[in-house]
Amino acid sequence: MIEAMLVKSPKDYEKLNPHMVHGAFHGGDRGIAQSGGLRPAPGWGSHRMPIAGLFQAGVTAHPGGSITGVPGSNAPMVLLHDLGHDPAEVLSPS
């Protein structure tokens, strides 16, 4: 016997969190215009933002929220490279 049921639509999720555009759990549109290196917007797929020294990580950054942890590890690699460090040397076990 089913005692209770809760059904939510994408619009319900968007009302709970405006960042879930159309109910998208991975931060905004997942259409072709914002996929892969175009995520979160064309020209911003390298984790560098238009403001010098500002980097983006998280589900809205390339490659997106379905690849757990990758956006959060890619941004520091870009930062290390921009600072003139070899990420492989910095992260290698001593």
Image (tube, rainbow, N blue to C red):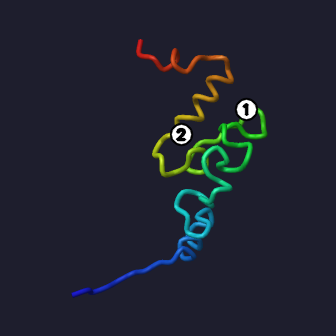
Residue situated furthest front in the rendering: 32
Going by the numbered disc 2, the residue's amino acid type is: Gly
In terms of secondary structure, where does tag 1 sit? loop
Circle 1 packing at 10 Å, graded few (<14), some (14-19), many (20+), is few
Q: Which residue, given by chain and number where applicable, does mark 2 sit on?
A: 72
Residue situated furthest left in the rendering: 1
Q: Quick one: label 1 or label 2, which is nearer the N terminus?
A: 1
Name the quarter where the C terminus is drawn: top left
Query: Marks 1 and 2, how far apart in space?
Result: 16 Å
Name the quarter where the N terminus is drawn: bottom left
Side of 25 where 84 appears, left or right:
right
Q: Is residue 46 above or below residue 30?
A: above
Q: Which residue, given by chain and number where applicable, does mark 1 sit on?
A: 53
Residue situated furthest right in the rendering: 51
**Residue name at image x 63 percent, y 29 percent:** 78
Side of 1 where 42 appears, left or right:
right
Q: Nearer the viewer, residue 30 or 73?
A: 30
Q: Which mark is residue 93?
A: none
* Quadrant of the rendered image containing residue 32: bottom right
Q: Is residue 93 above or below residue 17?
A: above
Going by the numbered disc 1, the residue's amino acid type is: Gly
- What count of labels does the image hold? 2
**Residue name at image x 48 percent, y 51 percent:** 66
**Residue name at image x 67 percent, y 21 percent:** 83
Residue 36, given in percent of the width and then of the height, sits at 60, 47
* Quadrant of the rendered image containing residue 19: bottom right
* Quadrant of the rendered image containing residue 4: bottom left
Residue 64, given in percent of the width and then of the height, sits at 55, 49
Q: Is residue 55 above or below residue 7?
A: above
